[in-house]
Image: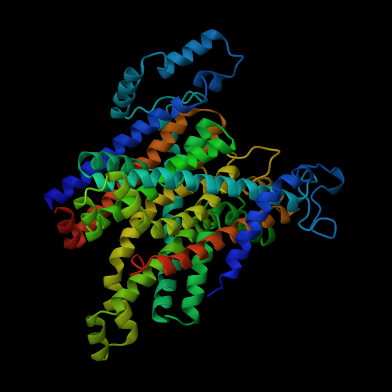
Amino acid sequence: MIRLWFPLGILALWAVAAISGDWVVESANQIDLQRILQSPGEQGLMGYDDLGRPILQRIWVGAQVSLLVSVGVVTLSLLIGTAVGLFAGYQGGWLDLILVRIMDVFLAFPGILLAIALAGVMGPGVDNLIIALSAVGWVGFARLTRGQVLSLKQRDHVTAAIALGTPRHLILLRHLLPLLSAPLIVEATFGMAGMVIAEAGLSFLGLGIQPPDASWGSLIRDGASYMLMAPHMVLAPGVAIMLVVLSLNILGDRLRDRLDHRSHG
Amino acid sequence: MGRFLLSRLVTAFVSMFGVACLVFLLIHLVPGDPVDVMLGESARPADRQALRASLGLDQPIDTQLLNYFSGLAQFDLGQSLHSKRAVGELLAERIPATLELAFAALFVALIIAVPLGILAAVERGKAWDWGAMGFSMLGVSIPNFWLGPMLILCFSLWLGLTPVSGRDGLTSLILPAVTLGSGFAAILACMVRSSLLEVLGEDFVRTARAKGVAEFQVIWRHAMRNAWLPVATLLGLQLGALLGGAVVTEVVFDWPGIGSLMIESIQKRDYPVVQGCVLFISLMYVLVNTLTDLLYGLIDPRIRLDNSK
């Protein structure tokens, strides 16, 4: 299919834009009334918005929010989810039962509904955004880890470790966790893709990043009111989201083929 | 079967109870004093006290929880702070629009995904397969809050074929349904393809072909019938997820459903209504999932036998 350099190139660009975002913040928020809704051209590669701010720079700054939130959420979800899943799967018994019931409750909220409600109630801001999305994100990792541990703990090397009197935390960390890393990395890559969309979605709804700061989602929301006069306001941030999400999904697909033979049949 | 039914119902009940508890806790996550946030800092102390009492926030938390559940048992979801109307009433007004959108999106997803998935499986490894899989990769990567505005731009603003927003007749339903349904079409097409590919490798398909059954009949009558089961489960799960995903789409198209009610209420800090919306959508989701599970168990004995072990 598409060679790996395409997604990797896009993701590298995303990371570089995010890291260097601080340098263009000033020009991204620079209001220039002469340039209101100006189309893309020589002066502005992606045109200007309804306050005459350059779209290119605003997308550049938006990369920072989207990378920060998606990496933050996936890291936090991965830590919580893996810990819960390891514990529930290995320990079994009533503890497992309770943890599975708790997971069921979180899984009973469809999609990002719970995140929307949490972000709406807790108020806007990057930290609340990360908390709200992690509250939704950890369950997937917990369920995956628990399922894997249930089958892995039957393996001979684990039985041998138990027979040799290896302490429990060492069995979990040294004998189980390394075998879990492949499916977890695959899940985390897809998780990143989902979180880029979720962050932009919450910001689109006005629950994430607040003005004057830019997020890809809020750029689309701002642009939607000027679509007929300045379609570039909606077009550019949307393409940015699509390229990053597409790259993460392609990367996830490739990683699954490469690392995780079992789930591929 | 009895045991299977019972275990599914218990799971559903526990989930619903947990969802209700989490929704109850939502209002306690409001930073600072929820009454301050709702009324603003300049509110008179008497008004504050009145709101606190009407929300029951002046009582200890266990009494609050008890009152909340006894209210739920009587289908009483509280009262809107803004319009002073019952939350249940507000929800009831919006339910038809959300259901209409969800079913229309499901229909769109089906008419795109089933032919595409079948084509991809039959033409495995050829151009159609790559095309279909490319479409589905793109479909899951395009957020609906971007697809929606782009469709409005093309079909409403440039071509003038459909209304920009609102709910007024069939033409106004087309764009929201396509926006909400396309992501699911992408997932569904993959599912149809892989499910059909699995079945096409079975002996009875080879037998049918050996008997000289026409290829179309082999696919549609013999293979597809067996490929439906996993697809049907996914459909059930998706119908529930569509209710959640509808929030963003409803906002894009100003569709008067529960999702847009929820966002409006968040903006007005009308928390009882927000709680009602979350609770309703989640309970619908649990209900649909449980029904799908039960139906699946009814159709395929392997499922219920596996579960009652």
What residue do we see at 84% from left, 48% from top? Answer: A35
Considering every residue shown, the one lying at the far right of the view is A34
Q: Quadrant of the C terminus of chain B?
A: bottom left
Front in this rendered view, residue B99 or A188 = A188
What residue do we see at 31% from left, 74% from top? Answer: B198
Horizontal and vertical percent for residue A261? 36, 68
Asked whether residue A159 appears in the rendered view, the answer is yes
Front in this rendered view, residue B21 or B244 = B21
A1, above or below A32, in the image: below
Front in this rendered view, residue A109 or A79 = A79
A19, above or below B81, in the image: below
Asked whether residue B167 appears in the rendered view, the answer is no
A3, above or below A77, in the image: below
Front in this rendered view, residue A132 or B113 = A132
Left or right of B196 on screen, residue B294: left
Horizontal and vertical percent for residue B15? 29, 40
Horizontal and vertical percent for residue A96? 25, 43
B175, above or below B216, in the image: above
Q: Quadrant of residue B68?
A: top left
Horizontal and vertical percent for residue A240? 64, 57
